[in-house]
Amino acid sequence: MPYYKRIRELREDHDMTQKDVAEYLGMKQPQYFRYENGNRDVPTEVLISLAKLYKVSTDYILELKHDTN
């Protein structure tokens, strides 16, 4: 799943609206909408703020897998 779908899933799982998240991030809802729909890359600072908001790692949002071999 692309990371922008993951941030939408997290938002919905936390019963938040795009407006709620945009306000938390200090931006307008249309800007956040573009991140969540994959129209714009999410800046690192925003990614970190989203991870803090949802209490997950940035690796989780980005779906990074670590090879243990």
Image (cartoon, rainbow, N blue to C red):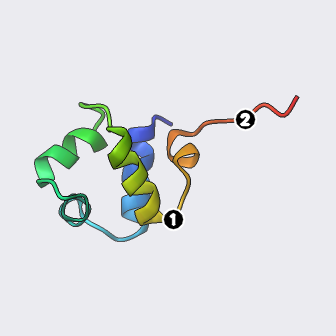
Determine the residue positioned at 52% across, 47% down: 58
- Mark 2, other Cα within 10 Å: few <14 / some 14–19 / many ≥20: few
Residue type at mark 2: give it: His
Kindly identify which residue carries mark 2: 66
Residue type at mark 1: give it: Lys
Residue 69 occupies quadrant: top right
Residue 29 occupies quadrant: bottom left
Residue 21, relative to residue 37: is it above or below? below
CA distance separating discs 1 and 2 = 20 Å
Q: Is residue 16 left or right of residue 27?
A: right
- Mark 1, other Cα within 10 Å: few <14 / some 14–19 / many ≥20: few
The disc placed on residue 55 is 1
Q: Position of residue 59 (x, y in %)?
A: 57, 44
Secondary structure found at label 1 = loop
Residue occupying the far front of the picture:
45
Determine the residue positioned at 35% across, 71% down: 15
Q: Position of residue 60 (x, y in %)?
A: 57, 48
Q: Is residue 12 left or right of residue 2?
A: left
Going from N to C along the chain, the mark reached first, 1 or 2, is 1
Residue 61, relative to residue 49: is it above or below? above
Determine the residue positioned at 32% across, 38% down: 43
Q: Is residue 56 left or right of residue 34?
A: right
Q: Is residue 21 left or right of residue 53?
A: left
Residue 39, relative to residue 63: is it above or below? above
